[in-house]
Amino acid sequence: MYKYNQLFELEPNFKADDAEKFRSNATEELINETVKSLESKNHIVHVVEDEASALELIKKLIPDGSSVMDAGSVTLDEIGFKSYYFSNEHKWYNLHQKILDEKDGASQGGLRKKALACDYFISSVGAISKQGSLFVADASGTRVGGFTASNNVIVVAGVNKIVESESDGVKRATVFCYQCESVRARKAYGVPGSVVANFTQINHGSVFGPKNTNIILIKKALGY
């Protein structure tokens, strides 16, 4: 995965819409308003200072023996989660590794679908609105699907992903992030760009059961 600043090394003329707006860190006032909104919608919210604190919190949130699946995420790379997840330092069941170990394409596709119904699904998002909604987009369905199929969700995001309105949430997730991801996709896969094939706006946490979404906000600009 390429960090945001590395996109300009790949394509020096790259320019994303509203980059200054969508890369700016939220103010303390906006963070506090967003936390209150998220908590009112049955989410558990944690605000941490840095990447290391976020990773340590994830380690505490996931019990030993849990099945864990992740979505592709620059943010997760930046906090060190991917390195830890693919190491032997934890006692989780790494579903992503099981997928990679399967060399048959059809079987691998089936494993990807099953992995979304994991104990813990970890991902970032394209945006989080002040009103308490999460905005998620992807090309393959392996990010969007995990938010509804898994038993528990852990969202990790820099405070640069907090936006003032729901319309900004849609734009950040489907335009700004799409443009950034397209640079990465052109380099990684040799395609013209990415595709927003799937998009969801999550307006509320678990309605009938216990709270099952932990949102970790990091006071830094991370991801796309």
Image: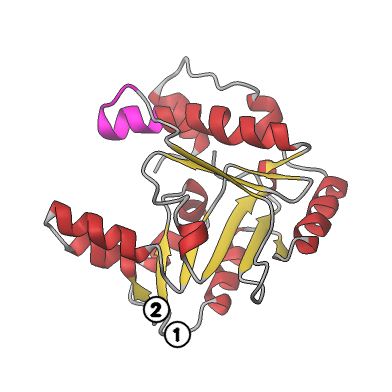
Q: Which amino acid type is marked by label 1?
A: Asp
Q: Residue at x 66, y 77 (%)?
A: 210
Q: Look at the picture and state if 90 lies above or below 9.
A: below
Residue 80 in sight? no
- At which x and y percent is residue 150? 47, 67
Q: Residue at x 63, y 30 (%)?
A: 171
Q: Residue at x 47, y 25 (%)?
A: 8
**Residue projecting furthest to the bottom:** 64
Q: For the N terminus, which image quadrant?
A: top left
Q: What stretch of residues is rendered in magenta?
A: 183-192
Depth check: give the residue in front, 83 or 209: 209
- Which residue in the protein does label 1 denote? 64
107 horizontally vs 176: left or right: left
32 horizontally vs 4: left or right: right
- Which residue in the protein does label 2 denote? 92
Q: Look at the picture and state if 79 lies above or below 44.
A: above
Q: Which amino acid type is marked by label 2?
A: Trp
Q: Residue at x 70, y 59 (%)?
A: 49
Q: Quadrant of residue 221?
A: top right
**Residue projecting furthest to the front:** 208
Q: For the C terminus, which image quadrant?
A: top right
79 horizontally vs 210: left or right: left
Residues tagged 1 and 2 counted as in contact (Cβ below 8 A)? yes
**Residue projecting furthest to the right:** 29
Residue 188 colored in magenta in the image: yes
**Residue projecting furthest to the left:** 104
Q: Main secondary structure of the magenta part?
A: helix
Task: State the SS at label 2.
Answer: loop
